[in-house]
Image (cartoon, helix red, strand yellow):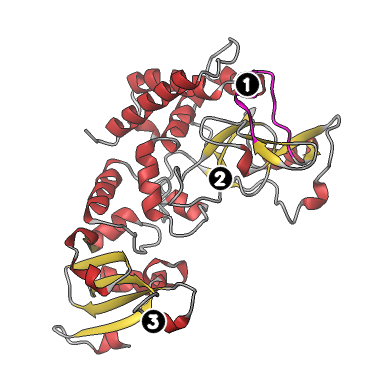
Amino acid sequence: AFGHLLSDTGRAGFIVPTGIATDDSTKAYFSDVSQRQRLVSLFDFRTGPGLFADIGHQRFKFCLLTLGAAEKTDFLFFALEVKQLSDVRKHFSLRGDEFRLLNPNTLTCPVFRSERDAELSKKLYRAAPVLIADGPPERNPWGISFMAMIHMSNDSGLFRDAPASGRLPLYEAKMIHQFDHRWATYAADGSSGDVALDAKQDPNFRVTPRYWVDATEVESRLTAKGWSRGWLMGWRDICRATDERTVIAGLVPRVGVGNKMPLLLFGAGVEPERAAAFYGNLAALVFDFVARQKIGGTTLNYFYLKQFPILPPDRYSEADLAFIVPRVLELTYTAHDLQPWAADLGHAGPPFAWNPERRARLRAELDAHYARLYGLT
């Protein structure tokens, strides 16, 4: 209401939850004021000593929101004290077209800790389009569709406690990591833990899941999605911007997969070599930088993923693929159970040795190559 009462030179200020700018439930309001150039500033705080301290031990995010005519908006996030408003390094500004650049599907507010983070993110978004831009018309250069195969609660009646003929392992998100489909395994007592180095170095070693599911159940769900490859690609749904890595995606055999590891299914025109380049993009350090600017909670759902800048298929030259694909192959094909993935990439030899020093070098080379592809020096 105050926005409609304002004159061309008037202003109105409010103290409201920060979610007014970042939450899906208020995106229509925020996109309206930002796109009409009616948002002067938004300064984000957290309750605590000196700031609504009587609320108690819990911490809530709130902001000082100012409406009025403005060609660009002044932002500051993560302030704990009023005096931090004077720290120019924490401020950044966005124009209406830059909201569309960074969050084209929702037009919600991106959250940055500094002007440097904002400027670098804008540079990366100008270098690559978002994964899927909602339409009409939808722009989806990879032909990506998403799938949550088996729900760990609603489908629990399908779970079996032991392997048997006609059953497949049920992978959970915590069992995979970047370039590693054998990150964690279950013990006989039901506890889970990291896979030891000597086990990773054994190409015959396979992780033990907590549950198994009937192969017919897995096949019927994948067939319904039109997926015929002998491998699956997905990511951990649970994540944090404060962890060492935020986006943790992995490749697994054609097995059962729990819903906390959503799957990415490519369109029919995407050949395996470009799918390998796509996976390398998900695991790249420069991509992780963008993701951790956008994640406010602990869930990386597909709404977030759709709005991340991901290099499109036609960005990769033959020289790029010649550099990327052998490295992604060597880092991922470390055990026989991913042989269908290796075969799709034209590799008929045995799995590659798990050598930590070599793997670190290969990953560093990929990080550098993707940074260059995004236009960084």
| Quarter assignment of residue 362 | top left
Can you identify the residue that label 3 sits on? 52
Gap between marks 1 and 2, in whole Å?
A: 25 Å
Q: Where is residue 95 in the image (x, y as percent from the top left)?
A: 21, 62
For the residue marked with disc 3, what is the amino acid?
Phe
Tally of numbered tags: 3
| Quarter assignment of residue 88 | bottom left
For the residue marked with disc 1, what is the amino acid?
Asp
Q: How crowded is mark 3: few (under 14 residues within 10 Å), some or many (20 or more)?
A: few
Query: Relative to 257, is 106 above or below?
Result: below
- Give the residue displayed 51% in from the left and 18% down from the top: 355
Nearest to the eye among marks 1 and 2: give it: 1
| Label 1–label 2 contact, CB within 8 A | no
Q: Nearer the viewer, residue 121 or 91?
A: 91
Query: Relative to 217, is 204 above or below?
Result: above
Residue 198 is labelled as 1
| Quarter assignment of residue 309 | top left
For the residue marked with disc 2, what is the amino acid?
Arg
Is 215 left or right of 39, judged from the image as shown? right
Residue 236 is labelled as 2
Q: Is residue 39 magenta?
A: no
Gap between marks 3 and 1, in whole Å?
A: 54 Å
| Label 3–label 2 contact, CB within 8 A | no
Residue 311 appears in the rendering:
no
Is 146 left or right of 49, judged from the image as shown? right
**Residue range highlighted in magenta:** 194-209
Residue 294 appears in the rendering:
yes
